[in-house]
Image (cartoon, grey):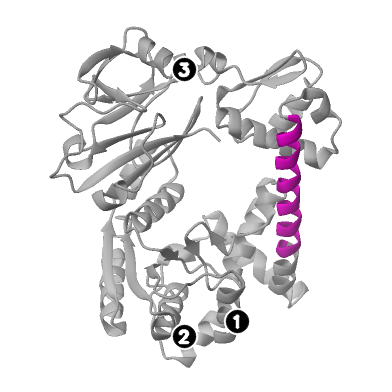
Amino acid sequence: MEQKIRATIQQYAMLQCGDSVAVAVSGGKDSVALLHFLCSLREEFALNLTAVHIHHGIRAQSADRDEAFVRNLSEQFGVAYRCFHFDVPQQAKQRGLSEETCGRLLRYEALESLGTDKIATAHTLSDSVETLLFHLARGSGVKGLCGIPAVRGNIIRPLIDCTSEEVLAYLEQHTLPHMQDESNECEDYARNAIRRQIIPRLAEINGAFETNAAKTMAILREQNVYLEQQALEFLKEHGNDAAAISALPQALKSEVLRKLCREQCGAVPEYRHIQAIESVLGGGQVQINGGATVRVRKGKVEFPAATVGGAYRFAVEPGEYTLPVGVLKVQKINCKQFENFTKDRFSFAVDCDKIKSNLTCRNRQAGDIFFDAKRALHKSMKKYLAEIAWEPEQRAAFPVFLYGEEVIGTLGSTPDITVAPDGDTKEVLYLYLERE
């Protein structure tokens, strides 16, 4: 298995000499094997490793046991250790997410907050095959059937070509202990049912099932990359020309429309929404997910934001929020990281200690006024949006930030002094609107 992991690291250029790496360690077999293997590369790559454990606040004594195990394992391996505590059930309720989805978001937010060069997670080929089958069961396009990527941004997955059986053999070879998450035994969870029932049955049909599935996912990834490249080239040349889109082969047409939706209104349309848009390419309009309207007028595919989404309001926590005007990304970062972040008309930042948990985002309303600390004056949102030349038809959906019930600013403004970062700030809540 060691040679296979080395080959994966080399193929995807996962590590550079001197990298700092946050290693996600649950205490389970995969993450223990990952941490142990990366420790074996410390001298070769001059790695600075930190074992990061997430306590989800769900399994009580079992979770405390896992935390103690990872802490002791880190000491044994001689690596730095960090633990983050979350109340996932409460956070999931506040964000309107499932506990599984919320837990995943919180894990990555915690790992990103450390500001390391790389984040290493212990996803294996077996996990990737589970993802393939999960997406296949619920219905998916090519991208959803590509499995888990080996690299995504600064996130690396050195074990992605290794099966669960190979990981177990590695643990036995090196006499490494690991913890067992009892929730993995519960077959109520879809992924657990796939892992415990479906995959073993498919392996009975063909013992090389996982290997063959890996080949299939590799082929689909190549096809997906090509399709995305073709869609980008088409959009550069033809933009939102409805006739040109209508004349495309079906696969490319779907990808172009999917990219247009994401770029123009932040929506990620399902297949039925793509079909609905195709039905009006000759003229007309339809609504897609999130309430976004797609209109074809004068031969152009348009996204009139005045009809997109309607009113919205939510408590702001780290994560991503799809708004009618784009995707609002929220990160908790330290001051040193904040110095390197983009600060423009799409961004906003507040002091975490000052804001606590009372930050709210809603769409702009008539009469909204905020105090722009940088310019030392009160300004109406109506005037501000005209000054930054924001599209008139999208102004009703522009985000405004509140502390309690007081408007404290908007994208591109300096927040009210009561919540603004200053010389004593330790952590910043950084908000950025991504329009593409």
Disc ID at residue 4: 1
Give the image quarter of residue 368.
top left
Considering every residue shown, the one lying at the far top of the view is 367
Of the residues shown, which amino acid type is indicated by label 2?
Answer: Leu
Considering every residue shown, the one lying at the far left of the view is 424
Quarter that holds the N terminus: bottom right
Can residue 192 be seen here? The reply is no
| Tag in front: 2 or 3 | 3
255 w.r.t. 243: above or below:
below
Give the image quarter of residue 351.
top left
Disc ID at residue 33: none
State which tag comes first along the sequence, 2 or 1. 1
In the rendered image, residue 230 lying in the magenta stretch gets the answer: yes
In the rendered image, residue 226 lying in the magenta stretch gets the answer: yes
Q: Residue at x 75, y 52 (%)?
A: 226
Give coordinates of residue 331: x percent, y percent: 35, 44
Of the residues shown, which amino acid type is indicated by label 1?
Answer: Lys
Alpha carbon of mark 3 to alpha carbon of mark 1: how far? 54 Å
State which tag comes first along the sequence, 2 or 3. 2
Disc ID at residue 171: 2
Q: Residue at x 47, y 89 (%)?
A: 172
Disc 3 crowd, CA 10 A, few/some/many (<14, 14-19, 20+): few
Contact, CB < 8 Å: mark 2 with mark 3?
Answer: no
Disc 1 crowd, CA 10 A, few/some/many (<14, 14-19, 20+): some
Query: In the structure shown, which secondary structural element does the residue marked by tag 3 occupy?
Result: loop
Instruction: Give left or right: position of 323 versus 206.
Output: left
Q: Which residue is mark 3?
A: 389
Can residue 240 be seen here? The reply is yes
Q: Residue at x 46, y 19 (%)?
A: 397
Query: Residues in magenta?
Result: 217-238
